[in-house]
Image (cartoon, helix red, strand yellow):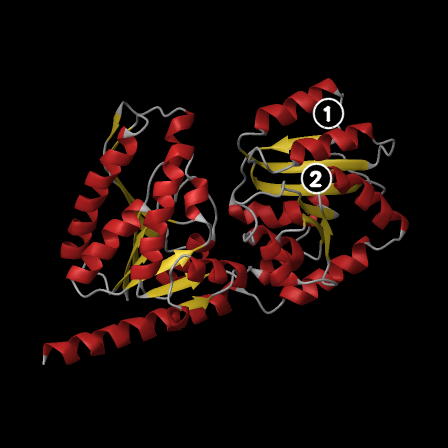
């Protein structure tokens, strides 16, 4: 199969996300994948000039060998003009790829470029699949554009030939946004189970001086300002239990604030902050922890989200403390190694209670058992078959109409 992917996030710097795991494994199976992406973090200070020129990156991979080809169309790096330039350059790139690459299917993860891709897919009798991993219009940074973004998102859901969602909560959301229930299916997130379940964290614990008595809280991923980690750090600083420590792996809006808290409260040996690490190193960091976290504030963005990191935490046999988000509860339920809280400042007290109950290890075993069948290879097989069925059905329909 030849697959064209359009997204409005940075495939190279962000992740690994659902797209990395699936598409890199598909290329490993002999399929050809090209990704049109967008440098979403240009606002944070790009070294490129005002106009970022078109670039192509070959064999891009984060999780397995045989990577994808990433095409990054030119944009103007100014507010508002970035969207206008995207409409022009991404349209031209989609036209170019449809003409030269001749994809069997187009998969969209974004808003504007998915709208452009749907138009070209229809003109060229190519099936378009909308892959939903977020409530996209809520992620638009300019609030004044969110209402318009919602209209675009609804149109995309209505016009897609098929809609894939990563959990039941998001499937319900797509239907509310206009998707045909008969064409909206769930293909869940996965985990590299063997890699995470067998990982050894002893070297990482020695690296940071963690003793056997220390209980290490762990978070990895983008540090959104609503991720709640600053509140967890403050509660840890106020705790008298010096064996409670926290290791944070990632980057984002809270990075500077966490450094301020660490310095202000003298937490240099208890609050460890590390930037991104290569994917192959991640399992050992998870294995080095005792309790893994998703302590985000409750907001509209997070309600239906089930981050891949939860599966990775659980595959490593770690108890998870997580905000009571609707999507997560619907996905994992209760009694499966996840302990729900209502607010980030409850993490420390809940951890101390679990320590007193000596429940951390046994709860981690429950978590690991729950996700053992969610291996990425199995999920990729399901995804591959679904794509093949859509392409075959679309081809048969086109040939029937052409007679």
At label 1, counting other C-alpha atoms closer than 10 Å, the crowd grade (few under 14, some 14-19, many 20 or more) is few
Please give the residue where the numbered disc 2 appears in the rendered image: 344
* 125 on left or right of 265: left
Residue 313 in view: yes
Q: Position of residue 138 (x, y in %)?
A: 45, 43
Q: Is residue 133 left or right of residue 56?
A: right
> Which of the numbered marks, if any, corresponds to residue 268?
1
* Residue shown at 38% from the left, 47% from the top: 150
Q: Residues within 10 Å of mark 2 (few under 14, many from 20)?
A: many
Q: Earlier in the sequence, mark 1 or mark 2?
A: 1
Q: Nearer the viewer, residue 153 or 348?
A: 153
For the point 42% across and 54% down, which residue is it?
A: 19
> Is residue 74 in view from this perspective?
no
Residue 369, x across and y down, in percent? 69, 66
x 84%, y 55%: residue: 359
Residue 273 occupies quadrant:
top right
């Amino acid at each position: 199969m030849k697959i064209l992917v359009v997204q409005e996030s940075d495939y190279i710097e962000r992740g690994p996300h659902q797209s990395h795991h699936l598409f890199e494994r598909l290329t490993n199976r002999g399929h050809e994948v090209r990704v049109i992406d967008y440098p979403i973090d240009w606002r944070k200070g790009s070294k490129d000039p005002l106009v970022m020129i078109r670039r192509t990156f070959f064999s891009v991979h984060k999780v397995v060998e045989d990577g994808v080809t990433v095409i990054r169309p030119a944009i103007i790096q100014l507010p508002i003009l970035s969207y206008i330039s995207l409409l022009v350059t991404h349209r031209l790139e989609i036209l170019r790829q449809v003409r030269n690459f001749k994809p069997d299917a187009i998969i969209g993860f974004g808003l504007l470029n998915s709208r452009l891709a749907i138009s070209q897919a229809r003109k060229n009798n190519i099936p378009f699949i909308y892959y939903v991993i977020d409530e996209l219009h809520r992620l638009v940074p300019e609030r004044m554009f969110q209402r318009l973004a919602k209209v675009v998102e609804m149109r995309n859901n209505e016009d897609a030939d098929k809609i894939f969602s990563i959990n039941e909560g998001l499937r319900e959301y797509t239907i509310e946004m206009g998707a045909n229930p008969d064409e909206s299916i769930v293909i869940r997130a996965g985990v590299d189970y063997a890699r995470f379940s067998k990982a050894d964290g002893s070297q990482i614990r020695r690296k940071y001086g963690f003793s056997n008595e220390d209980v290490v809280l762990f978070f990895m991923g983008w540090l959104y300002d609503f991720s709640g980690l600053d509140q967890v750090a403050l509660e840890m600083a106020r705790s008298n239990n010096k064996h409670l420590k926290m290791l944070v792996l990632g980057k984002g809006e809270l990075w500077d604030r966490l450094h301020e808290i660490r310095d202000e409260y003298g937490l240099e040996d208890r609050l460890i902050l590390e930037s991104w690490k290569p994917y192959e190193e991640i399992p050992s960091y998870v294995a080095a922890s005792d309790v893994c976290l998703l302590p985000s504030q409750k907001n509209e963005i997070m309600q239906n989200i089930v981050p891949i990191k939860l599966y990775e935490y659980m595959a490593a046999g770690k108890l998870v403390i997580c905000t009571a988000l609707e999507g997560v509860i619907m996905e994992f339920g209760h009694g499966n190694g996840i302990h729900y809280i209502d607010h980030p400042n409850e993490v420390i007290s809940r951890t101390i209670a679990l320590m007193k109950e000596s429940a951390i290890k046994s709860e981690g075993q429950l978590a690991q058992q729950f996700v053992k069948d969610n291996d990425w290879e199995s999920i990729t097989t399901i995804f591959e078959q679904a794509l093949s069925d859509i392409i075959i059905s679309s081809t048969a329909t086109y040939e029937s109409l052409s007679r």
